[in-house]
Structure formats: C-alpha cells, structure tokens
Image (cartoon, grey):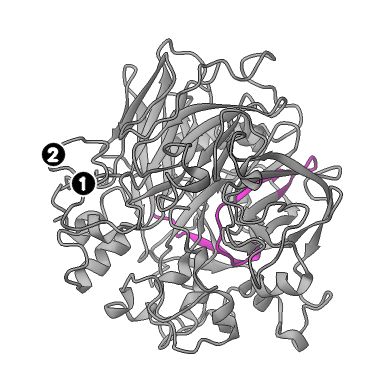
Amino acid sequence: MAKDFSTMEDSNRSSNPSIHEISSPARRTLLKGGLGTALGGLLAPLAATLPGCAATGGTGPLLGFKSVPLSTADRLAVPEGYIAEVIAAWGEPVGLSGESPAFKEDGSNTAAEQEAQMGMHHDGIHFFAQDGSKSGLLVMNHEYVDDGLLHRDGLKTWSAEKVRKAQAAHGVSVIEVADKGGKWEVVRPSPWARRITSRTPMEFSGPAAGHALLRTAADATGRRPLGTLNNCASGITPWGTYLTCEENFIFYFNGPEQPNAHERRWGLRKNGAGYRWHEHDERFDAVKHPNEPNRFGWIVEVDPFNPSSTPIKRTALGRAAHEGATVAVTRDGHAVVYSGEDARFEYIYKFVSRDKIKPGGGRANADLLDHGTLYVAKFDAGGAGRWIALTHGQGPLTAANGFADQGEVLVKTRQASDLLGATKMDRPEWIAVDKQGWVYCTLTNNSERGAANRPGTDAPNPRADNSMGHIIRWKDAGDFDATSFQWNHFVLAGDPANARAEARGNVKGDAFGCPDGLWVDGRGVLWIQTDMSTSAMGKGDLAKLGNNAMLAADVHTGETRRFLVGPSGCEVTGVTGTPDGRTLFVNIQHPGESPSEKSDPDQPRRYSNWPDFRPAGRPRSATVVVRKADGGVIGT
C-alpha cells in the first residue's frame, strides 16, 4: 500500500473468449503435464509451499550477502557483487501491436496513449516463465496515480480527458520480457502485451454474481462490472492465472452527506479522497449510483496468456480492501487462498475450495474459486487460533441481522466479520507461505491501537501506538484447510536501540519498520519490503531507518539483512523471480513522494527524479532487475 487511507472514516462479452482459453503454444506445452508440471515450472515459488519440494542451492545458510547500509540518498542500492537495472518504467509502451507511444516528460501524453503504456505506481508483480528462466511474462499491478505528475498541469484544470487518463494509469500491465545476452529487455511488440484499466469490461462469478447489491442502471444483470482499481498486492494460481486485488477502492467515490450504515462501515464519504472522477464519470458518484462501490473490493482473476480474455471478479473470496491473495495447496489438492485487508482494525481471511485442483490448467479449473468456504481469523491469547466460517445461516449471519443470503454476506464481509467476533488487526497486508507450512502476514502499523475509543492491545497486536508494525505467522493444524491453528510473532519491527519501548522491536540483524511486501523464494528465503509513510519518515520512531528497503530473512534463525534500499520518497513493493533463482524483479513505487503525499505540479522533481536523473525528468515508478554479477543465485 502506498497511501495510508486508514486514517479516514471508515459491455460486450460475446467477443471475449473465456479467461481459461489456452492460446499460447508455450503455455500448452507447460500445462499439458497437469498440475505437477505447472508447479514445477511456471509456479516454482508456489511449489515451495507443498510437501516434498526441495530448496534450491543446498542446505547451508540462507543469507550469504553483505548488508546494504541505511541511506537517504536519491538512488537505489544493492549489495556488493550485484547489479540493478531499470526496465518498464511508468509511461513506457507495453508492446501492443502497432502502438508504441513514447513517454513525454512534460506530462502531455494523452489518455489513449496511457492506455498503451505502463501504468503508474507499480505494485504486486509475478514472473510467468515461458522459456525456463530466459523469458516470460511480467504481470504487475498499478495501485493509484499522482495527478500532479500524471498531467501537465496537475489538478489546476480538470476534464473528462484527465479522468480517462487517470483511469488508464490504474489497473494491470502484462509485458513480455527476455534475457538478451545478459540484459533483460521488454519485448515489443508482443502477442501477450496487455493493459487492463479502470474501464476494462469484466465479469462477476460466484455466489454474489447477479446479486441485487451489484446491480446498477448501466448493468441491470449485476454481472458485468467495468474496470478494476487500486490494485495492490497480487497472487498466482496453480493453474497459471494471476490474482489482482482491489484495495482502497472506496476513496474514489463521491458519497452522500449522510452515508448509511453500510456506506459508513466501508468509509464512503463526500468527495472521497479528492480524485474527482465523479465530475466526469457518473458511475463514481455513489449518490446517483449507490451500488457502484459494491462492484469493487474483489479479487480479480486474469489469464496472462490470453490477452482477449475477460478478467473475472471472484465473489466467493469476499469483498474487502484486499491487499493480496496468496494460494497454498492442501496435500489432497484443494486450493486455499489467504488474504489480508489493509486497514486499521480489519481482518485476515482464507478461502478453501470445495473441489480439488484438476490437471489441465485454467480450462479445467474455470470455476474452482467460485465454490468453497470463506473464513475469517480469530487469534486467541496463548498462541491458539481458529477460522470462523463466513457462511449464511450460521451463527449471527442471518436475515434478522441484515444478511438475506450468501451474496449479501460476501458483499458485506466486514460487517459479517464484525458479528463473528474476528480479531481486529494492525493493517494486515501481504501474506507468504514458507516451505514448512508457516503462513506469514505483515501488520504494517497502527498508530490508533489503544487510542481513546479505539480497540486496545491484545495478544496478536501487543503494542499501543504501533508505529513500527510486526509480522505474525501461523501454522494450520495438519493442513492448510484446517479450522484451527497455532500462531506466534515472527518479529516485532523497530530499531532495538529505540528509546520508546513500544517501538523498540526484537529484530535480529538489520532494523526495519513498517513491513509490507512479503515473498518466499525457491530457497525458502523470506523477502520483506517496507512501507514507511513519507509523512512519517525522518520523524519520531522512524527517524533513523532511512529510505524504504527490502530485506532478506532466514526463517529458521530470524536473522534479517538489508538487501536493497530504494530512492528518496519511494515504497519498495512487489518482488518476484525466475525459477532458477538468478534474477529478481522488484518494483519501486512513487519515488519522490512528498511528505504531504501530494506532489506540486509546478515542481514535480522537488523530491526525486529517479530513475532517469534528467533535469526535465519526472520521478517514475519502475521495475528493477537485480542479478548477481557472477550469475549466481540471488542471496547466496
């Protein structure tokens, strides 16, 4: 997550083949061997969550590099012996056939050009291998926009064209990349290149599809939503698709002066967060179209190998400010999807599929995520926990309490979790699963924990005014589909030398604050990315931690080492790698973000001009390729 909004109150389908059409010869080769082939190649990191998957690089120490020092410089730093190169910055063409609009440093690119370019503010990312570790598809999210940088004159004037351009800079990019003689490049044109935006036609599936709460004047069926936005973290499936997650969607809407209880619970308010889309796109005016916000907040499944496929919003996974969607697989082949909701005092969820994953890739698993049970987590004192089913008719989830059916439970997932007494967490964000079956979740921070009229500390969230955050982990009893678990704290973030006890932490190794992104690589290294707000960096508890960074953690010893430090004002978010472990792709978001989180349209380079460093350049989010100079495995 880039901006901490948690301080606020709380078409034409027939021409689009199914998301599960398999169009790529490379993909047919990959998936024809069934689930085992997919897990062994395309989804090597996911395979690490399954029994019997061997680690790459032997059984020695996981961390073999020298830590990178803290820094406040406007540059990106990696360890000695490593090389970092920028590819796929905001505004570069994605490689659509016949469309290669160049990025214009004065912000004068049109909305139509932005629809063919990399979106703004890169976030969750995954590498889908095609030719082993030499080429593949990078699929990544674009979380939000900074209008002061996106447009030539920022917000000084406003128009339908600017709204369309901002909507085009959101969503997802699919690009083809290849290692050409030791240097990774974007392949242009590419048959797989694609932009998915806030205007792309989509479908609802699952129990809430067609529900009255999803119907609008433009879509009386309640089955054909338009667009995705505020896409934060992501996930991958064993059948070769990408899960993109809609996070702080509510702040794009103009709400009524006096919102109803449902709208208040989701934070809808007049003028939202100032995006002003409703002034030229009426569907973002929730006063006129009160059900339109209900059509966001979902996990969306995308087939990266079929650019004409329709993205599907999977309602069985629940509606929330979803940070990500991490898939594990039970020993008998059921899919389990873990997700956190990045807002203060919100919840952690998991979905267990009713059916087993079938061989045959996406086509064979076309509706796997439409049937199953959604649970919310209850962390009890003493290290025990349980998963409570979000099932209509069970416990308080009845019509008498405002839940007419399962569809309403899923649209109102927050309210249902409230009634079930689930544990309110300190901004649960990314989730990762290690090779021993431990499930890790970053709890970025919560400065309101213990404040007046707010929940106090508890066993899983033990620090009041939690400025530093922590990482919690649990192991489900027996297998991932169990309804009970044991939990502990992997780490309480913070500088061990901090004078304030509640921000001191118990980090073993390099200190960090505000953990956000998480990923477990094929060797079992836990990669941790930080998101210290620019409005807080350099102040109070965070004063000595420098720029945001990415660290590697040994899950066996708890040691952390700083591997990468980003440029000024950035967030380090999103990491993926090639199956051979020799290349990392890391996203750098919003370099140069100002302490007020609002750029000055007249001085867009005031805080950074990374990565171009040209006098006329604007700071741009970008993907960074990290390799070892000797060609070795990353982190060894």
Q: Percent from the top left, x then y, of residue 551?
A: 53, 31
Q: Amino acid at mark 1?
A: Arg
Determine whether the residue tagged by mark 1 lies in a helix, strand or loop.
Answer: loop
* Screen quadrant of the C terminus: top right
Q: Which residues are the magenta region?
A: 307-335
Q: Percent from the top left, x then y, of residue 333?
A: 75, 44
Residue at 83%, 53% in the rendered image:
385
**Could one spot residue 410 in this view of the protein?**
yes
Residue 394: give its label.
none
The question of residue 528 being in magenta is answered with no
Determine whether the residue tagged by mark 2 lies in a helix, strand or loop.
Answer: loop
Would you place residue 57 above or below residue 102 in this image?
Answer: above
Q: Percent from the top left, x then y, of residue 72?
A: 37, 35
Q: How many numbered markers are drawn?
A: 2
Q: Looking at the image, do the residues carrying marks 2 and 1 touch, with CB atoms under 8 Å apart?
A: yes
Would you place residue 525 above or below residue 282 in this image?
Answer: above
Residue at 65%, 76% in the rendered image:
407
Q: Which residue is label 1 attached to?
A: 605
Q: Which residue is label 2 attached to?
A: 615
Answer with left or right where residue 130 lies relative to residue 365: left
